[in-house]
Every structure is written in C-alpha cells, then in structure tokens.
Amino acid sequence: MSAQTRLIARIKESALTVADSLGRMPVMMEVCGTHTVSLSRTGLRDLLSDYIDLRSGPGCPVCVTDYADIDHMIAFAEQEGVAVATFGDMIRVPGSRCSLEVARAKGASVKMVYSPLQAVEYAEANPGMQVVFLGIGFETTAPTVAMSLFEAQKRKLSNFSVYSVHKLVPPVLKGLLSSEDISVDGFLLPGHVSTVLGRAELDFVASEYGIPGVIAGFEVDDLVVAIDQLAMLIKKRTSRVVNAYQRVVREEGNPRAKAAVERCFTPADASWRGLGVIPKSGLALREEFAALDAARRFTLNVPRSRPPRGCRCAHVLRGHIRPTSCPLFAKQCTPSSPVGPCMVSSEGACAAYYNYDYAGHV
Amino acid sequence: MCLGIPGKVIEIAEGGTTATVELFGARVKVALDLVEGVEPGDYVLIHAGYALQKLNLEHARENLGVWEEYLCLHKQG
C-alpha cells in the first residue's frame, strides 16, 4: 500500500471516529479559491465525500466582490478617456447591469494585465489616458498593488489610480466564527494568504474561537497531509493552528510585504457579497496616496444595484449550502452562461463543482 | 486568484530589483522588491509578477517524497 493510500485510510478512520461522537460527518471549510479548485480537480472532495464534508467558504476575492463595486468598475471603464486595467479574473463577473467583458464589447476600455506593474507601464505609455487599476484580492495580492502605487509615485504619473476593493481574510473568518449558524469543525487555511500574514496572525482561529486550523499548500500531497492533520486535531479535540506548508509559510509571514501594505492602505469597512458589511475587512488608500485613489479622483453616478433573482451565491459563500443545492446550478447557471459570481470565476465554488465534481454525475 | 507559482532564479539584474526566473521551462522577469536575500539558484514563489517568498528547500524535499518517515513521526508524536 502506498504511503498516500495509507494516509487516506487514516483520514477516513479519524473522520469515522469523529462522526461517532458528533452524530454527523466532520465539516472542514476551505477559505481559498485555489484550494476549492484543487480539492475538486484532484478528486479529493469526491474521494472523501462519505467521510468528510469539505465545504467551500468565502475564498474567492472575485466572488465576494459586491455588485455595487463591480457596477463602479464598469462605470470607470465607460468614461471617456479612461481605461480600466485588471487581472483577468474580474472581467467576466457580472455586476447588476453587465460585466466588464460586455462593457468592453460595447466600446468601454478594459485592459487585462497579469501584474499591477504592467498597469503602471501601460499608464506611462499612454499619457493621454487615465488608467484605473482594479485592486482586487486578499492579503496575497495587496502588497503587489501597494508596489504599483510606489512605482506610479516614483514615475510621477498623474494618469494612474487604483480602485481598491481588497478584502482581508482574518476579519471574514472572525465574522464566520462569530455567526450562530455556522457549524465548522476545522479550517483548511489559505497557504498564500498565510505566506504574507504568517501563521501567528491566524492563530486566533484556535486561541480565540477554539477551532483547529491547518495552513495548507496546493498540491495533492499538501492537501492530503493537511486534511490528515486537521482530522487528527478534530479527533483529539485539540484547537491549534498548524502550518503544514512550511516550505513557503513562516511564523511571521513576509514582513516586507506587510510593511508595503501598511504604508499604502488602512483597514476599512467593506461590503462582501453574501456576507454584508464586515468592519475593517477591506483596504482603503491612506491620505498620503489620496491622489492615486480612483474613488476620489472620479465622481460617478452609479445606480443602486440589485443581485440576480434566484441566485444563491450568498449561501454558497457562507458554506450554508453546496453549489449543487442551488436551484439554478447546471440549469440556468453554467460556466458558459453564468448567473452568479461563484459560477463565473474559475476559482468560484460553483464553477469548480460544475467542472470537476458534477461532470461525473451527468 | 491567490495563485502562486514556484520558479527558479536564474539571474539577478543589476541593482537587484528584478530577476530572470524559470517557470515550467519559460523564462520571465520577476520583481524582487518584496523579498530579501534572494540569490541565483534559489526557488521563489511568484504572484502577480512579484516574488513573494523564498522557498525553504529543506521543507520542500521533506514534502516531496518521505511519506513513510512522515507517518512514523506522526505515530510517535
């Protein structure tokens, strides 16, 4: 028997022991879109489906972006002389009227970049155009956007700005852990958010809320080891936050990256799709960078937005239901014709379930 | 969205702020502003055009294959 098979057997054993005492399967929640995809793509979610309820939480920054924010992004792109530069993840996500992709087809200026630095270079090469970079993403991405602000300052660009809708993981975890309707026995914690934050900043999951967590990498071996460790912690009723991704994650994270974010941004209340406003869960540009803040540079009149009817992304994002329980799933809502953000984003839970888990059951 | 890809540092540009990194056989330019003490031959985790962390190869090797050892350690612990 291979070592991996033995580990899987041991995971099942731990899960059964836990199920005996709880009267239900243990629930593990991942809060990282890349984990969501990895668990589906590797087949681990399916393999363990009779033993562990592996549930997806709010781990995809694109999926948790509020409709109103997306409507604003589109409004920027529709302005004369303004180009929106963005990571590709955001392009197809619908706001209440349309997506950036549709707006682009109608003539709005939307430029896809893979690094914020490219957006700065684009602004420098097009001095006659205002370039608004969409600051989306968790702690992993925010330092790279901070660097683009420094770079724009250094190059004295007056045509570059950032629209920050960054989200922070610890506040949303605290929100989830404080809500009464959550039943999660352990968290698979995001490896690359932890690369910046460090294990110590996620310790509160165990020390304040008594729930164990394991920081996990993204390869199948990483995930198997992490699930095994988490199952062990749950079984032994030990609340600790363990780092199972030590080749990348350090106890204190990346101090340089944290300092860059601290210099540019200040925590601000943010609206999460499905979760509402969570205090200090976003990042706003500091006063020193007000000149580079797209929200202050442009005055836009954006109509009030409404979520699409019947879409249950809000419940999926809170881990209340699996994507397959949404009445629109694989009917009106598919990756080629998505209704909600969780089906649009390649890292959305609905898209991952549709592409990997659901395919076998058609 | 938080996708990070490990790559091997081939060459560091003069001034030390960018590096040429090999990713799946392709060579790309990566900014080094967010990491310290990176040298050619190191592996770094890359996200959105920036190196975000230097990989600890000792831990990487541990993860790469020694399942048996891991299991034994775990049983003893």
Image (cartoon, rainbow, N blue to C red):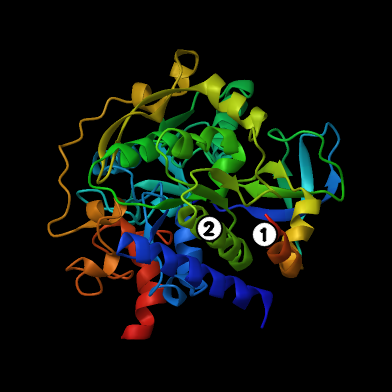
Quadrant position of the N terminus of chain A in the picture: bottom right
- Quick check: B31 left or right of A19? right
Mark carried by residue B74: 1
**Residue at left offset 44%, top offset 73%:** A48
**Mark 2 surroundings within 10 Å by alpha-carbon count, few (fewer than 14), some (14 through 19), many (20 or more):** some
Quadrant position of the C terminus of chain A in the picture: bottom left
**Residue at mark 2:** A232
- Quick check: A283 left or right of A320? right
Tell me the kind of residue under disc 1: His
On the image, the x and y values in percent for residue A287 come to: 44, 13
On the image, the x and y values in percent for residue A4 come to: 63, 74
**Residue at left offset 51%, top offset 55%:** A230
The local secondary structure at tag 2 comes to helix
**Residue at left offset 60%, top offset 70%:** A7
Q: Distance between the residues labelled 1 and 2?
A: 10 Å
Q: Which chain carries label 1?
A: B
Tell me the kind of residue under disc 2: Met
Residue A117 can be seen in this image: no
On the image, the x and y values in percent for residue A35 come to: 49, 58
The local secondary structure at tag 1 comes to helix
Q: Are the residues at dot 1 and dot 2 in contact (C-beta closer than 8 Å)?
A: yes
Give residue A357's quadrant in the image. Answer: bottom left
- Quick check: A184 left or right of A227? left
